[in-house]
Image (cartoon, rainbow, N blue to C red):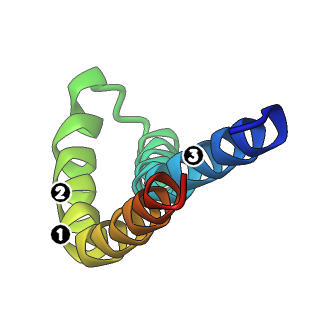
Amino acid sequence: MNGAEVLDLGRDALWLTIQLCAPVLIVGLVVGVVIGLMQALTQIQEATLIYAPKIIAIFVALVLFLPLMGALLGGFMQTIAARISGM
């Protein structure tokens, strides 16, 4: 492999990491902002109130997006296996 192929593979791996992490992080961000707004509006300043809804929302997001994540990882592995066999 030359330098350009290694950089291409690294770029693909970083993009895959972003694609895998984005749905769960976005769900956690949205739930955190909504709970924070609700706390600000109702003036309930309980620091531990945000954890249970976030954990549940992230778990549901993982269950929903797990097939997509598996398909992305499977496709990336097939690409890498094809490159290895082509050497």
Query: SS at mark 3?
Result: helix
Disc 3 designates what residue?
13
Q: Amino acid at mark 2?
A: Phe
Distance (Cα) linking label 1 and label 3? 23 Å
Against 63, residue 55 (above or below) is: above
The percent position of residue 2, horizontal first and vertical second, equals 77, 36
Work out which quarter of the rendered image holds the N terminus and state it.
top right
Q: Residue at x 16, y 43 (%)?
A: 52
| Quadrant in the rendering for residue 43 | top left
Against 53, residue 45 (above or below) is: above
- In the orientation shown, which residue stands out farthest toward the right? 4
Say whether marks 1 and 2 touch (CB < 8 Å): yes
Q: Residue at x 80, y 32 (%)?
A: 3
Q: Amino acid at mark 1?
A: Val
Q: Nearer the viewer, residue 38 or 69?
A: 69
Disc 1 designates what residue?
63
Q: Residue at x 54, y 51 (%)?
A: 87
